[in-house]
Amino acid sequence: MNEPAHYRFPPASAYRLNRCLFALKSDAAFRKRWEENAARAMTEAGLGHDEQALMLARDRDALVAAGAHPYLVFMADLRLRMDRSSVEYF
């Protein structure tokens, strides 16, 4: 088994980024604060300028390259899109 692993654990340096994505996925109050003022919500989450730019660009590949967990990137984006949709989800 000399093949490279297809999954890499997120580095500790991306903890705040992943924590913010987790909050977007799981915390309705945080998502509301994000929708009202994303910059303030990200500052509150402890993200720096570079991380904030990645989050605002919503570039999945760039976020993952920066250490974001792919599942959290997907789910955070899905939850934000669900909140903006008029379709009711069960």
Image (spheres, helix red, strand yellow):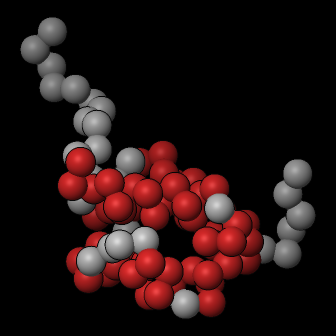
Residue 76 horizontal side relative to residue 83, left or right: left
The residue nearer to you, when weighing 2 against 40, is 40
Residue at figure coordinates x 28%, y 37% from the top left: 9
The residue nearer to you, when weighing 62 against 35, is 35
**Quadrant in the rendering for residue 17:** bottom left
Look at the image and tell me in which quarter the N terminus lies.
top left
Residue at figure coordinates x 61%, y 71% from the top left: 30
Residue at figure coordinates x 52%, y 55% from the top left: 22
Residue 54 visible from this viewpoint:
no
x then y, percent, for residue 51:
29, 73
Extreme residue toward the left, this view: 2
Q: Is residue 82 above or below residue 38?
A: above
Residue 67 horizontal side relative to residue 36, left or right: left
Residue 65 horizontal side relative to residue 56, left or right: left
x then y, percent, for residue 10:
28, 44
Q: Is residue 79 above or below residue 38?
A: above
x then y, percent, for residue 81:
66, 70
Residue at figure coordinates x 38%, y 48% from the top left: 69
Residue 24 visible from this viewpoint:
yes
Residue 86 horizontal side relative to residue 50, left or right: right
Q: Is residue 79 above or below residue 68?
A: below
**Quadrant in the rendering for residue 8:** top left
